Amino acid sequence: MTIHKLMVKDIRNLESLTIQPSPFINILYGLNGSGKTSVLEAIYLLGLARSFRSNRVKPVIRRDQPKCTVFGQVRHSGSAMLNIGVSRALQDENFQIRVSGENLRSTSELAQHLPLQLINPDTFQLLEGSPKERRQFLDWGVFHVKQRDFIPLWKRLQKTLKQRNSLLRHGRMSSSINRSVLGQIRAELLVWDAELVKASESVHQLRQEYFEQLAPVFHEVLGQLTNLEGIKLSYYRGWDRVRSFAEVLAEGVERDIQSGFSHSGPQRADIRVKMDGINAIDILSRGQLKLVVCALKLAQGLLFYQKTGKQCVFLVDDLPSELDAPHRKALCSILQNMKSQVFITCVEQSALSDCWLPEVNVKVFHVKQGRLEANEQIYPGREIRQAESLEIEHE
Ligand SMILES: Nc1ncnc2c1ncn2[C@@H]1O[C@H](COP(=O)(O)OP(=O)(O)OP(=O)(O)O)[C@@H](O)[C@H]1O
């Protein structure tokens, strides 16, 4: 998928702009605070109807405006152009999503139309953050590669788990007062546990299959990015490797009742990253951690392409400040070989000037608070291209 045209209205400091990006590499450069990340936010909103920086909608909407809107023409390989529009209003937690004239009710439907991979300074959280970050990463892949199977299973799992946890909470409250209520709860738990076992085993199976496909692609990409050796990925399903989930649930039920929640299950799954047996976050440098995270994200994009024939769009924020020149070059080289559409931001345009092959379609946008001359020589040795200016209302 590629964004052919992007129209943004009232997103952060972007009042109103329209761009026609390159289907391959798009460089957004400009001073701090000029609005580069805001452009990435707009694309993220187009793909997921939410911000990547905040759970709230308010920070995304331009100050003093009631709502923000982004519209995109998205080209799918071998098929017609899709018109996608997403609007979020200050006074309403809901969103409006239209795809080719139809209203969509769920963001998961929207996400299928524009799969995105974000690499930004916060992506460190993938290794440093809680297992939830890594589960979300894993589920992105399972969702996009095995969509039809995964979504109904996932919903069933969430529903069953919610029911079980509510019974457990009820059990915890009743345990000291009423033995017969507790007995009833135990009986009900047996029914829900049977359902939970089925849903959990199925979700685990899809995750495991996906993980086994991802791991070799990750190692290949990591090898292209850096000569770091000894990195190992492993998948933890959320309960131990020896016993069945039914056994684990049965053995842990008293403990679960005492604490009022389920200790084991796919809601505890994780991807573990180790180097020579030691947790990667305890041994790798910041830059090396970043490279591992980049390799995970790139591998996911590559595998998505291998399995579906579709490309995802990469949003790369502030890359030069995170990586040294050789690693930056290696990452850009992988991105251009993938032939995905990439939006990449930097402060100094020169930081990314020697990263691309002459035949690659690179479009450069100078983001600044005001107007800019339209013609620029982009890179020495390259033909003269037009640098499009994003006109951003002066605050
Ligand atoms: N809701 C909002 N309404 C108006 N302006 C906003 C809003 N949110 C953020 N801004 C402003 O938008 C400007 C652009 O922010 P953005 O993060 O896009 O900059 P950037 O070009 O990525 O900067 P940097 O290089 O420092 O990361 C900043 O001055 C910021 O304060």
Image (cartoon, helix red, strand yellow):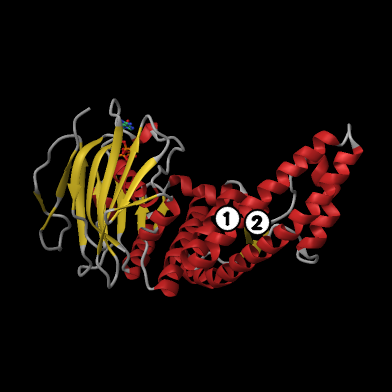
Left or right of residue 360, residue 45 in this image: right
Q: Nearer the viewer, residue 70 or 231?
A: 70
The answer to whether one can see residue 323 in this image is: no
Q: Nearer the viewer, residue 92 or 24?
A: 92
Q: Label 2 neighbourhood size at 10 Å, few (<14), some (14-19), many (20+)?
A: many
**Which mark sits nearer the N-terminus, 2 or 1?**
1
Q: Which residue is mark 1?
A: 155
Q: Looking at the rendering, which quadrant does residue 13 occupy? A: top left
Give above or below for 179 relative to 361.
Answer: above
Q: Name the element at disc 1.
A: helix
Residue 269's label in the rendered image is 2
Residue 80's label in the rendered image is none
Give above or below for 154 relative to 365.
Answer: below
Quadrant of the drawing holding the C terminus:
top left
Q: Nearer the viewer, residue 9 or 159?
A: 159
Quadrant of the drawing holding the N terminus:
bottom left
